[in-house]
Amino acid sequence: MEPVTFSTSDGVLLEGEIRAPDGDVVGTAVICHADPQRGGSKDHPLLWAIRNDLASRRGLVVLTFNFRGVMGSGGTHGGGETEAADVAAAVDRVRREADGPTLLVGWSFGATVSLRFALTDDRVSALALIGIPLVVMSTTRVPELPGREELASLKTPVLLVAGEADPICPVPDLRGLERHIPHSEMVVIPNTDHFFWRREGEVAAAIGDFADRSSRT
């Protein structure tokens, strides 16, 4: 694991970690964490599991990082708006490590930011969205989801992941979102909720399998 720092286009210094695979490199990945206002950071077992699977089993160089205002990253929380610049900087940084496609993975708040970013940057070759907030709590600042026309324009393969009992990303609502994204598929993890406690490996495997399929298309 290599600690790294990198700067955004608006001058914010972010902290992150890069994990490289032991063998051949086939591409890169960036992982975006959950809501900073509710304790989200790069240091969560779910994100560790995803990072380890992508690096050790799928041949990807993986960057996890803290959004602005979180732990050692500079700046202040931007409600999901200025965080787009954080994702752009993270993609820039990881692509200095290796050529090839870039998978973007986002959980919760990070999923919303990732989806909006993928609509604007064709360096994202595949997109995995975990527990994307479709029922937003009143104390949480999350940008609105893109409209139907924007979603319909998304050419990137998309994986939608939810826990069966997730109150923030209810499965029926997620199926509705899936219908508006052209190249999407959906995985529901049974008997768990928004946090996937003790089910991290299943989520990681689903995203890793999606990464493998996406790299072949």
Image: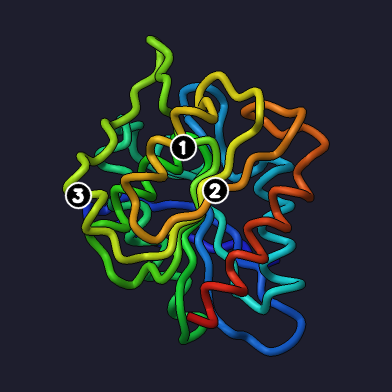
How far across and down, in percent of the image, does residue 87 sit?
A: 37, 55
Tell me if label 2 and label 1 are in contact, CB under 8 Å: yes
- Neighbor class of circle 3 (other Cα within 10 Å; few <14, some 14-19, many 20+) is few
Q: Which mark is residue 124?
A: none
Q: Which residue is mark 2?
A: 186
Residue drawn where x is 35% and y is 31% of the image? 77
Measure how far apart labels 1 and 3 are at the Cα level. Answer: 17 Å
Whichever of callouts 2 and 3 sits on the residue coming sooner in the sequence is: 3
Residue type (three-letter) at the residue carrying disc 2: Met
Residue 17 sits in quarter: bottom right
90, 168: nearer the viewer: 168
- Neighbor class of circle 1 (other Cα within 10 Å; few <14, some 14-19, many 20+) is few
Whichever of callouts 1 and 3 sits on the residue coming sooner in the sequence is: 3
Using the rendered image of the protein, determine whether residue 32 is visible from the camera's viewpoint: no
Residue drawn where x is 66% and y is 42% of the image? 43
How far across and down, in percent of the image, does residue 155 sit?
A: 30, 66
Residue type (three-letter) at the residue carrying disc 1: Arg
How far across and down, in percent of the image, does residue 146 sit?
A: 24, 41
Residue type (three-letter) at the residue carrying disc 3: Glu
Q: Which type of secondary structure does the marked residue at label 2 adopt? A: strand
With respect to residue 119, does 137 lie above or below?
above
Disc 1 vs disc 3: which is toward the camera? 1
Q: Which residue is mark 1?
A: 175
The colour scheme used to paint the residues is rainbow
Q: Which residue is mark 3?
A: 150
Measure how far apart labels 2 and 1 are at the Cα level. Answer: 8 Å
Residue drawn where x is 65% and y is 33% of the image? 163
